[in-house]
């Protein structure tokens, strides 16, 4: 049996990384910046969920032990920070409902209750070849403040 040379999930995550990097700038007012970029209004994050071969979403935990300010949380939503080979560093996106309550995906809450996602400094390292599906979400979920 031949070894897979490419993974569709890996390709999707690499594409998301490229899209995000195209928006991030060191000097946003410089003459070489993307001043006319349409995506400026959408921010710099393409949120997504990834799924195992059993169709279950990857769940990760942030602020375990509450050593940093803020609550311990779990999430199924991520932002790609860096792709290196078949591995990736993903930052955890914390999910809130429209009443600003943190959602718990290991307990009772469902993804349909998500109103807002926020970036965090918590990361997870993943092997992209271990996932079978990726579900990209609307970038407008990041830091959302009201219904459209």
Image (cartoon, helix red, strand yellow):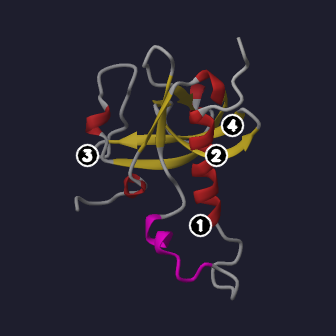
Q: CA distance from mark 4 to mark 2?
A: 9 Å
Q: Is residue 45 magenta?
A: no
Q: Report the residue marked by disc 2.
A: 14
Image marks 4 and 2: residues in contact by CB distance under 8 Å = no
Q: Residue 35 appears at what percent x and percent y?
A: 57, 83
Residue 60 visible (yes or no): yes
Q: CA distance from mark 2 to mark 1?
A: 15 Å
Q: Quadrant of the N terminus?
A: top right
Residue 88 got which mark? 4
In the current view of this chain or complex, which residue is farthest to the bottom? 31
Q: Report the residue marked by disc 3.
A: 99
Q: Residue at x 71, y 72 (%)?
A: 26
- Image-based side of 138 in relation to 62, left or right: left
Q: Report the residue marked by disc 1.
A: 23
Residue 122 visible (yes or no): no
Q: CA distance from mark 3 to mark 2?
A: 34 Å
Which mark is first along the chain, 2 or 3? Answer: 2
Which dot, 3 or 1, sits closer to the camera? 1
Q: Which residues are magenta?
A: 34-42
């Amino acid at each position: 049996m031949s070894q897979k040379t490419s993974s569709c999930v890996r390709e999707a995550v690499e594409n998301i990384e490229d899209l995000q990097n195209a928006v991030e700038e060191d000097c946003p007012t410089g003459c070489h910046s993307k001043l006319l970029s349409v995506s400026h209004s959408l921010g710099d994050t393409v949120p997504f969920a990834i799924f195992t071969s059993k169709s279950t979403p990857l769940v990760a935990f942030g602020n375990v032990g509450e050593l940093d300010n803020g609550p311990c949380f779990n999430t199924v939503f991520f932002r790609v920070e860096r792709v290196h080979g078949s591995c990736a560093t993903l930052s955890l996106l914390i999910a809130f409902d429209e009443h600003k309550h943190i959602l718990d995906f290991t307990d009772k809450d469902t993804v349909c209750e998500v109103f807002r996602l926020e970036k965090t400094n918590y990361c997870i390292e993943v092997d992209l070849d271990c996932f079978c599906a990726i579900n990209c979400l609307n970038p407008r979920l990041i830091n959302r403040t009201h219904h459209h």
